[in-house]
Image: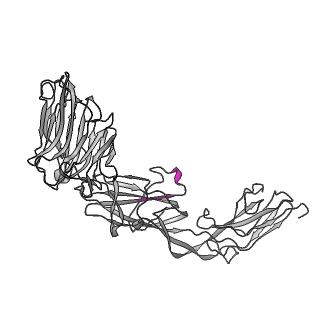
Amino acid sequence: MNNIRKIAIFTVMILGTLRAGGLGKGPRTHLAQLSAKEVVLGGKDGWEEFASSKNVTTGTGRFGYPAVELAPNAFEADEDTDLLIDFENAVNPISNGNYHINKNLLKRSDQTKLEKFAGLARGNGGLSVSGRPGTFFGSEGLTGSFTLEFWLCPSVAENGEIVFKWESSKTVSNQLIYQLLNASFNKGHLEWSISNLFDDDINPFTSHDIILKGRTTLVPDSWSLHALTYNSENGCLEYIVNGVTEDLLYHTSTGQEGGEVSLIQLGTPSEVHFCPEYTGKIDDIRIEKRPYKVQGFQSAENAGKVGHTLYVPQGGSFISKPIMVSTGSKLNSLTAEMYAPPQTAVLFYVRSGENYYNWTDTYPEWKPVESGKDIQGVTGLYFQVCAELYPDGSGENSPSITQITLDYYELPEPVPPFVVNAVAGNGTVTVSWNYSVDDTAGGYYVYYGTRPGEYLGRMAVEGDSPINVGNTTSFTLTGLENGRIYYFAIAAWSAYDDRVVGKLSREVFARPLARLK
């Protein structure tokens, strides 16, 4: 694992009673050595890919190291997303949608409202894309509901600056009709100009030219969320800023809600221009094939209004991949290097087990722990960590985690016996050995087989190799074939956990014979 370091720190001496008496003489009191180690997640080596995560990203934490923090409340593509441009990819700002780039003169800026990057326009042409067949702006003919939405942060908001522009033409009664969808600044407000966008045969009562005016004064160097949306169910064409309706009209036969609704009729597919004559930043441009859907959450200062906070109040979380240590390891503590502004919170959970392949979201059970506090009852071959991050009440501040350190005790593998002998008999072999000099040895395994170094025996009456013979120094295997040579080795298992087995002793051999007693 690239980002997980295992470092031996020191040796702890623990008084225990595994067997009494002197070496090789039954029960006695002794000292057992447990090795204290640590696993580091994050830190200067960065964070590995998580087993799962939600609403989190990486930023800069303590000492300039990568830190896990809440992801800004950005758009996420779904089945209705026609186009999503979020500027996170340095090569291609389009993260979703069947569109291709014709021209991109936008730069990336890290001064953003959402995620890590925004697009920076300097009034020199912006970004132009074309939709492939099946996309909203890549198709010709009647279409239904749509929403065009984006974050905007103008530098000057000068009159005439164009943020969005689409031009095309359609044929009506054998005449070529010009179409326009344009958003530009007028006296500090964004204004939408719409020409010949709808099916005129169905709705002859509404003007072919539509103006939707914004009421919110757009302040330079301040972010705001803009949406132009049309609902084909009720004919409502609406301009929304920061979740609040600025202007609307009903494109129906009555000019009001009710009556016959006309559909949008697009002409020849053509380029879509973002920021062609605009200076400032733009982010998370999205086209949806559905009416407007509130993407934000209510903030404390805007209670009762529809707002958009930087971080969702539900927060975010991540779960590490299972971390392999050694069988029977005991987790002592979790210590996090983190930053938690007032009202924010970070919660930690751990779990463990010997085999993670049968783990589910709830099994083994997650145990809540606190950073720097002792942990009890978490042992196993694998550890796993979960962290939950929560923003403050305003949704404007996020906690961050730079590093997580897991301190644990690792059960050492007991040393094998130094002296091993094998004596053959009639269809039998008696193997004997001295007690291990290692105080952690609680018992022994006898390994046997018919080839040197391969202990795959299955013929002894006492069982298949290896045989757990308990805390003894002699064992006889019966039912062996006379005249055949057998090879043996001994390994000690830990008195703390018999699943922890040490290395094999030196190999010995013997050949049972019928003439032997």
Q: Confirm whether residue 244 shows in the render.
A: no
Q: Position of residue 126 (x, y in %)?
A: 23, 48
Q: Is residue 351 above or below residue 372?
A: above
Give the total number of marks visible in the rendering. Answer: 0
Q: How is the image coloured?
A: one colour
Q: Position of residue 237 (x, y in %)?
A: 17, 34
Q: Position of residue 151 (x, y in %)?
A: 22, 49
Residue nearer the viewer, 32 or 18: 32
Q: Confirm whether residue 195 shows in the render.
A: yes
Horizontal relation, residue 213 to residue 69: left or right: left
Name of the residue lying farthest toward the bottom = 22
Horizontal relation, residue 440 to residue 337: left or right: right
Q: Is residue 84 above or below residue 197?
A: below
Horizontal relation, residue 318 to residue 14: left or right: left
Quarter occupied by the C terminus: bottom right
Horizontal relation, residue 151 to residue 69: left or right: left
Residue 356 part of the magenta segment: yes
Q: Is residue 371 above or below residue 235?
A: below
Residue nearer the viewer, 293 or 83: 83
Q: Position of residue 308 (x, y in %)?
A: 22, 49
Residue nearer the viewer, 130 or 289: 130
Q: Which residues make up the magenta segment?
A: 349-358
Name of the residue lying farthest toward the right = 515
